[in-house]
């Protein structure tokens, strides 16, 4: 029988804080300096998401965290646990950690955000055992040099965000084994060889590429489920592959800041599903003749495109 979360609570400074009907305990507006100030936390049996922030000195909280979290077998959401990393006026214990360890209590984890962990250099290879993980976000991990090959074992992963991680030069070879991956953000990594191995990314619907210098390989045309492709600040692009005309499901194409890109491939005329085309800060002087005839780009949408490039 599932635990009755409505009857479960903790005491914080003499106040009862109840779990909601989804098993979430929200303590973000409570001033907490030590783990022992959350009375009854280890007795909760229905905890699935724990929201913590607004600490007076969160560095004093850090030593107790691993021992406490290991008791929560149903914990699914650590997003807000890392929200304090974005606070510029706080002491960030995870911001000083050089290695992220996977605890036993993380086996039910579905969302993992390690954003702005500037000192993070290594992610535990055991991360590959998080078979329920759906979202992995790595934003601003400026000291992280690589990702473990076990990333390819995340069979439930749907979203992978890698942004402002300037030291990561290449994605693991088996990222292509992420059969359920639907959204991928890559920023500054060598994605060219990765796309050449994309045969198994048949579920990928959205691909966002930032600040990448390598040209897009012809193999991008095999991403048959791709609905949205965005290229931001990719200054090294001088042409796009003709194979992009094979992206039959593509609905949105955005190219922003590619000033050396002077023309679009004629094959884009085959994109019958295309409904939005954004060309901003590019060197494109004219569009393929039949591109304007696409049903989804007629009328006012076509006029806006003409004004932008």
Image (spheres, rainbow, N blue to C red):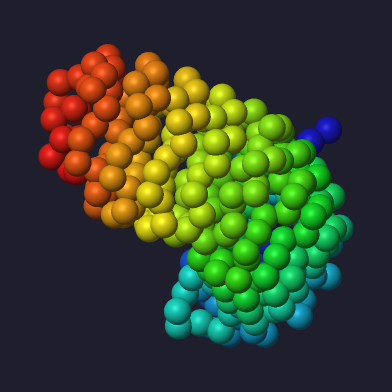
Residue 157 quadrant: top right
Which residue: 24% across, 31% down? 287
Mark count: 0
The x and y percentages for residue 10 are: 68, 61
> In the image shown, does 193 or 11 lie closer to the viewer?
193
In-image side of 281 versus 212 (left or right): left
Q: Quadrant of the N terminus?
A: top right
Q: Is residue 292 left or right of residue 2?
A: left
Residue 252's place in the image compared with 102, above or below, is above
Q: Residue at image x 56%, y 24%?
A: 224
Residue depicted at x 50% and y 37%? 206
**Residue at 32% over, 24% down:** 275
Residue 225 appearing in the image: yes
In the image: residue 16, left or right of residue 245: right
Asked if 216 appears above or below 222 in the picture, the reply is below
From the viewer's perspective, tell me whether residue 212 is left or right of residue 195: left
Image quadrant occupied by the C terminus: top left
Viewer-closest of 63 and 222: 222
Q: Is residue 46 in sight in this rendering? A: no
Compared with 219, 250 (above or below) is above
Residues 102 and 42: in front is: 102
Residue 307 drawn at (x, y percent) = 13, 39
- In the image, 211 versus 193, the foreground residue is 193
Q: Quadrant of residue 181?
A: top right
């Amino acid at each position: 029988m599932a635990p009755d979360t409505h009857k479960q609570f903790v005491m914080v400074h003499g106040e009862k804080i109840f779990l909601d009907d989804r098993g979430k305990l929200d303590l973000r507006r409570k001033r907490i300096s030590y783990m022992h100030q959350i009375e009854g936390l280890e007795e909760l049996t229905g905890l699935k998401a724990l929201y913590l922030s607004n600490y007076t000195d969160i560095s004093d909280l850090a030593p107790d965290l691993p021992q406490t979290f290991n008791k929560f077998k149903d914990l699914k959401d650590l997003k807000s646990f890392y929200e304090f990393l974005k606070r510029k006026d706080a002491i960030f214990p995870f911001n000083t950690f050089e290695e992220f360890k996977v605890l036993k209590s993380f086996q039910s984890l579905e969302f993992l955000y390690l954003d702005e962990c500037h000192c993070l250099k290594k992610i535990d290879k055991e991360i590959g055992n998080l078979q329920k993980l759906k979202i992995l976000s790595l934003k601003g991990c400026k000291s992280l040099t690589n990702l473990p090959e076990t990333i390819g074992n995340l069979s439930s992963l749907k979203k992978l965000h890698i942004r402002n991680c300037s030291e990561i030069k290449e994605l693991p070879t088996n990222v292509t084994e992420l059969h359920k991956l639907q959204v991928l953000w890559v920023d500054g990594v060598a994605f060219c060889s990765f796309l050449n191995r994309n045969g198994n990314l048949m579920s990928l619907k959205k691909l966002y590429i930032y600040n990448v210098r390598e040209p897009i390989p012809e193999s991008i045309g095999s991403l048959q489920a791709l609905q949205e492709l965005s290229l931001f600040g990719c200054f090294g692009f001088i042409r796009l592959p003709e194979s992009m005309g094979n992206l039959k499901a593509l609905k949105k194409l955005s190219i922003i800041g590619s000033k050396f890109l002077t023309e679009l491939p004629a094959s884009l005329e085959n994109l019958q599903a295309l409904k939005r085309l954004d060309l901003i800060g590019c060197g494109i002087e004219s569009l393929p003749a039949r591109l304007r005839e696409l049903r989804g780009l007629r009328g006012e949408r076509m006029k806006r495109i003409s004004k932008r490039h």
